[in-house]
Amino acid sequence: MYPALRRQGKALPLALCAVCLALVVPAGCQPGPGLGRATEMPARTVFPDARPVLPAGETESVPGDADDPAVWVHPSDPARSLVIGTDKHAGLVTWDLDGHEVQRIASGEPNNVDVRYGFALGDRLVDIVAATNRWDNRMDVYRVDPGTRRLIEVSGRFAGSELEEVYGFCLYRSPGSGRFYAFVNDTHGDVEQWLLYPEDGRLSGRRVRAFAAGARTEGCVADDEQRQLYLGVEDRGIWRYGAEPDAGAEGTQVDVTGAHLVADVEGLTMYYGANGTGYLIASSQSSNDFAVYDRRPPNPYLGRFTIVAGNGIDAVSHTDGIDVSNLALGPRYAQGLFVAHDHADEIPRNNYKLVPWESVALAMAPALLVDPASWDPRSTRLATP
Ligand code: CA
Ligand code: CA
Ligand code: CA
Ligand code: CA
Ligand code: CA
């Protein structure tokens, strides 16, 4: 099975299915009634050394095309935190930690979504949720009302972008200046950094940097302490750039497809520990698992895990976006939460799976850090803008 993994592509599924059935691998691989289950079968092919991890929850199914999640942490009652997910054909959806829908926003074609805390808007600090929207080639921005947990749109103007069609996206808050930025890319691999600022009670932005990654990009994540941007070049690998606007156009290769990643390289996320420790996690889409790297450059590869069926929840396959929080989020996720898009929930529907972080951490060998205390994304250690 392993060599076949290297032959990623559309022609693989039937061949992999036969191998999969012969070896009697995880439940998600078993054929079920209907064409839909057949579509899921090859999807449970993973690297043999990927550690199995059980999900503890899942969101309600998304009728359209789910892609990327973000976790919003409630400021005073973490059990009331939200999972926010894109439905690329409909809009943003938010769910509580039991996976029940809280809000649905018809907003066109949101692709990737991200969250930051403490943006000075008007006379208050607000939590912001932002998403690239392919429908109208812009970014939608919301603030979160912590009382109602509703997202309220505050999109302003975005000036100077030359992207033909916005696609992948992530947010960055500079630890030096306290300024907020968006990294926005398109399917040609053009990347722009936008400075975000308040204007007439709304959040606006303007381009302050642009560079070319050389091939189709999408997933990205910024390290808000170490001032790094990690960018997935879908069929090539992961690159690291400086995240400050004067960091230039030169990236450093972190990993390439073929070794630990099977294209597309999709979602990227960052687990923060103390003193720069922690992990960069990447969705290796066609091997249906997740590669883990040390957060500290040069970001050595540490191992991988896959989310198998269990606890009454189906396995995770063909993941696009992922997110992780180290914080204690209520009783079920008291040691942190990892969220992954699942391409096949109840086919053709898809959704997002919720995994206790310690399930990931303790499955790996050696075990990963479990540190719900060191990093607080609302930290006031940052300088004010
Ligand atoms: Ca995201
Ligand atoms: Ca993609
Ligand atoms: Ca995607
Ligand atoms: Ca599934
Ligand atoms: Ca399910």
Image (cartoon, grey):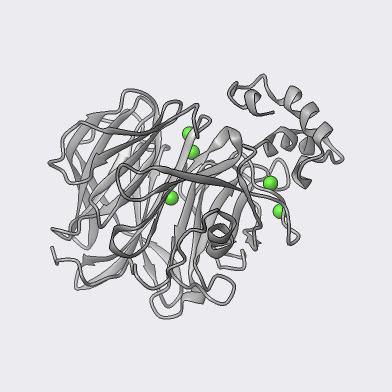
Q: Is residue 90 left or right of residue 134?
A: right
* For residue 253, above or below residue 54: above
* For residue 114, above or below residue 245: below
Q: How many labels sit on residues?
A: 0
The answer to which image quadrant residue 219 occupies is top left
Q: Among all residues in the image, which is located at the extreme front? A: 366
Question: Closer to the camera, 102 or 180?
Answer: 180
Q: Is residue 67 left or right of residue 27?
A: left
Question: Closer to the camera, 291 or 48?
Answer: 48
Task: Judge whether residue 69 can be spotted in this image.
Answer: no
Position of the C terminus, as image quadrant, is bottom left
Which residue is located at x 22 percent, y 30 percent?
211
Q: Among all residues in the image, which is located at the extreme right? A: 33
Q: Is residue 375 left or right of residue 332?
A: left
The answer to which image quadrant residue 225 occupies is bottom left
The answer to which image quadrant residue 4 occupies is top right
Which residue is located at x 42 percent, y 26 percent?
236
Position of the N terminus, as image quadrant, is top right
Question: Closer to the camera, 109 or 83?
Answer: 83
* For residue 88, above or below residue 155: above
Which residue is located at x 62 percent, y 68 percent?
98
- Percent across and percent down for residue 56 are 65, 63
- Percent across and percent down for residue 380 are 23, 72
